[in-house]
Image (cartoon, grey):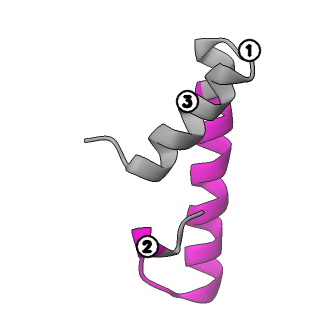
Amino acid sequence: NNNPVFKKYYLLKISQGKGHRCAQGHCIRKLLRVIYHLLETGQSFDPALLR
């Protein structure tokens, strides 16, 4: 499954002229920031809060 927020972010990076691997790297870093925030705050994942 693709998360629509991450898919949109990936397509944004592709439209900015980034390559596939570079766009993937941006998505991975975004996902890591989300995971870190969840661990630090103890919150549950809520895809509605992603931007």
Residue 40 placement (x, y as % from top left): 65, 81
Residue 12 is left or right of residue 49, and the answer is: right
What residue is disc 1 on?
17
Q: Is residue 31 depicted above or below 1 in this figure?
A: below
What residue is disc 2 on?
48
Category of crowding for the residue at label 2, using alpha-carbon neighbours closer than 10 angstroms: few (below 14), some (14–19), many (at least 20): few
Q: Based on the picture, tell me whether residue 26 belongs to the magenta stretch.
A: yes
Contact (CB < 8 A) between labels 2 and 3? Answer: no
Taking the spot 40% from the left edge, 48% from the top edge, the residue there is 4
Instruction: Tell me the CA gap for discs 1 and 2.
Output: 28 Å
Which of disc 3 and disc 2 is earlier in sequence?
Answer: 3
Q: Which residues are magenta?
A: 24-48
In terms of secondary structure, where does tag 2 sit?
helix
The kind of residue tagged 1 is Gly
What residue is disc 3 on?
11
| Quarter location, residue 26 | top right
Taking the spot 61% from the left edge, 87% from the top edge, the residue there is 41
Q: Based on the picture, tell me whether residue 37 belongs to the magenta stretch.
A: yes
Residue 16 placement (x, y as % from top left): 74, 23
The kind of residue tagged 2 is Ala
